[in-house]
Amino acid sequence: MQLEVGIGSKQKEDGSGVLGPRSQRLAAMLAVLSCLMTKAEEAHKAIVASLGCVICRDDGYGICSAEVHHIAEGSGKRSDFMTAGLCKMHHREPGTGLHGMGVKAFLMRHGLPTEYHLLELVNKFRAEDGV
């Protein structure tokens, strides 16, 4: 198995890059870790969705179906581990949803200081449900 040029790779005489044996082992281990991380992320998102909408649940309405909302500042890459379940109404509906009304207005309406407090609700309900 030959992998393409990467940092610290060796060059063939014709200028094409091939990783040495040690780098190939490292690349293979990184590929396995990447696959495991994806499975772990998918499992986490499934647990988050199973908790239901954290806003509805915190308001005493019980568990309802939820979409997975990614929490992050700015427009950078979002982690699948930084997620909270929100029903359609609280996730994306105009006038009531986080994306529909904007983060600041949504947080103010629900008495949350930051979007990260949604994660506290996720942890609270995971503890209650034992997941």
Image (tube, helix red, strand yellow):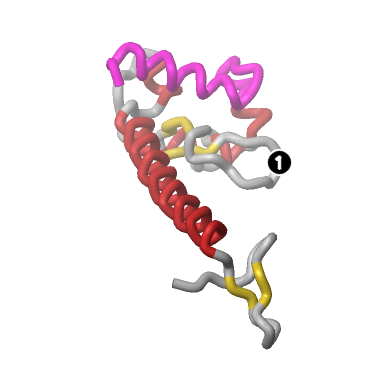
Residue 23 vs residue 128, the one in the foreground = 23
Amino acid type of disc 1? Gly
Question: How many numbered marks are there?
Answer: 1
Question: In terms of secondary structure, where does tag 1 sit?
Answer: loop
Q: Where residue 96 sits: x, y (%)?
A: 52, 33
Point out the stretch of residues depicted in magenta.
107-131
Q: Where residue 23 sits: x, y (%)?
A: 56, 59
Q: Which quadrant, please, contains the C terminus?
A: top left
Q: Where residue 122 sits: x, y (%)?
A: 43, 22
- What residue lies at 58% left-to-right and 67% top-to-bottom? 19
- What residue lies at 44% left-to-right and 47% top-to-bottom? 33
The answer to if 113 sits in the magenta stretch is: yes
Tell me which corner region of the image, top left, top right, bottom left or bottom right, holds residue 7.
bottom right
The answer to if 61 sits in the magenta stretch is: no
Q: Which quadrant, please, contains the N terminus?
A: bottom left
Please, what is the dominant secondary structure of the magenta stretch? helix
Q: What residue does disc 1 label? A: 74
Q: Residues within 10 Å of mark 1 (few under 14, many from 20)?
A: few
Tell me which corner region of the image, top left, top right, bottom left or bottom right, holds residue 39.
top left
